[in-house]
Amino acid sequence: MKGSLAWMTIFLFSSVLCGGEPVPQVSSDLPAPRAPKRVRVTKLEQVLPNARILVRRPYSWLVGAHYGLGLKEGEKLLIVASGIEPLVVQALVVAAQEMGVTTDVIAKDVAALTRRMGREEFDYERFDPSRHLAYRGIISRAVPDWLARMVDDYDMVLGFAGRGTQYGKIGRNRTVRSSRLDFSRAEQLASPALSYPDELLKLISMKTWNILVNGRNFRITDPRGTDISFTIDETNLERLKETRGMSTYGKKSLERPIANDASIQLEPQLNRRPDAHGVMVSQQAGYIPQGIKIYFEGGQVTRVEGGGAVGENIREALERFKNVQYPGYYPGPGVGWLEEIAMGINPKVGPAGPLRRRSGMLQLAFGTDRHNLVNDEDPTLAVNHRDIDFFYYMSCEVDGTKLVDHGRLKVLDDPEVRRVAAKYGDPDELLREDWIPEFDEKSGQIIYPAYEEEPVTP
């Protein structure tokens, strides 16, 4: 079943989600699925143009300024290639060396690292935080000692994200740039999302950020039954300057977007009295997609229904840490605080991802690890940060006005955004989402488009 009529039925399944409760019927005005042509990326010439953009683009944790390494002639780059496809590594090496950057590549077996360090990104409350690298007061996730001893010999280390007082600043004097690589697969590196005009994406970012940071009343809904509301207050914003402002820019500022490595974000738990209430309904909880319902009241999780292994894992953590008071601005004990709303802004992210960068994509997260002194004051505490992705038909109201409407980021329709887009091409095309996924009606899972084989040149 194709077209918009299919979307009237996709979200009607009831047995897949928790408790057998039916998901509310949705209107027929959801956009119909569409996907770009998808080809296999196997040749250097398919990825080298974007690799050249990536190595030269200014280094920044700000999503609106695009992802870049900010390399300069004479610098030294270390690529930790454990999780990066060989073709991507090759393209980055060629692009960096073209501009006079000395480049070294080191590869370690990913499975061996996982066995030694623990799958802390997936089992949030079971990993041992004391295994995190503590290097001159800087704590990074799952970084072995051999890498810590090497970083000061380089200007840029690509392949992991250092965590400390300021994101991406590591080394003895915190002068070495570091980053993991979101575009680690060849298909991602070849994506038009990476070559999207810097000026245009920055404008989209700033306009989205200004709405978020100046908003006070938020409501998020989606066709599967999610309906959660919260407020942002002045206390929240002052605390956000001290936490994410410092970790993103090294100063107490909200003038530019606060961002993680994928999307612009706010932190509802920083309110003087957090008040998030409602329910999240998701098929995409963590890395084990299972129907799950997570209920909130007074800013934190009060009940979790379904979710299979993920749901059980969350319930165990909530019980285990219910009397633990985390350092920072958490207003009470426990690990169920709604602590992040993050929003993607790039309309050209396709099936290869990174999905969280796609415009209108929403991530909600709860737990106790948004740079609120948890690592700095007590690095033995488990992180317990859990991300829930909502893909794609959510709506987000800010002070009663739609910022996202059924998956469409409304900033993309702003007249000034369209004027800037016209400088680079057809604004209708540049501001059109390349990919609106199709979903399986029974499981709720995304149906990814098949690859189209390129004709063989004689």
Image (cartoon, helix red, strand yellow):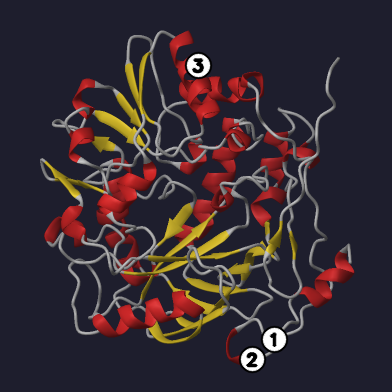
User: For the residue carrying disc 3, how many other residues have a C-alpha within 10 Å: few (<14), some (14-19), or many (20+)?
Assistant: many
Q: CA distance from mark 1 to mark 2?
A: 5 Å
Q: Amino acid at mark 3?
A: Ala
Label tally: 3
Closer to the camera, 183 or 431? 183
Query: Mark 1–mark 2 contact, CB under 8 Å?
Result: yes
Q: Residue at x 60, y 73 (%)?
A: 400
Q: Is residue 373 visible?
A: no
312 lies left or right of 64: left
Q: Residue at x 81, y 70 (%)?
A: 7
- Give the SS element for disc 2: helix
- The percent position of residue 271, horizontal first and vertical second, equals 33, 72
Sequence-wise first label, 1 or 2? 1
Q: Amino acid at mark 2?
A: Gly
- Give the SS element for disc 1: loop
Residue 121, picture quadrant:
bottom left
Sequence-wise first label, 1 or 3? 1
Question: Which residue was labeled with disc 3?
Answer: 95
- Give the SS element for disc 3: helix
- The percent position of residue 376, horizontal first and vertical second, equals 15, 55
Residue 157, picture quadrant:
top left
Question: Which residue was labeled with disc 2?
Answer: 20
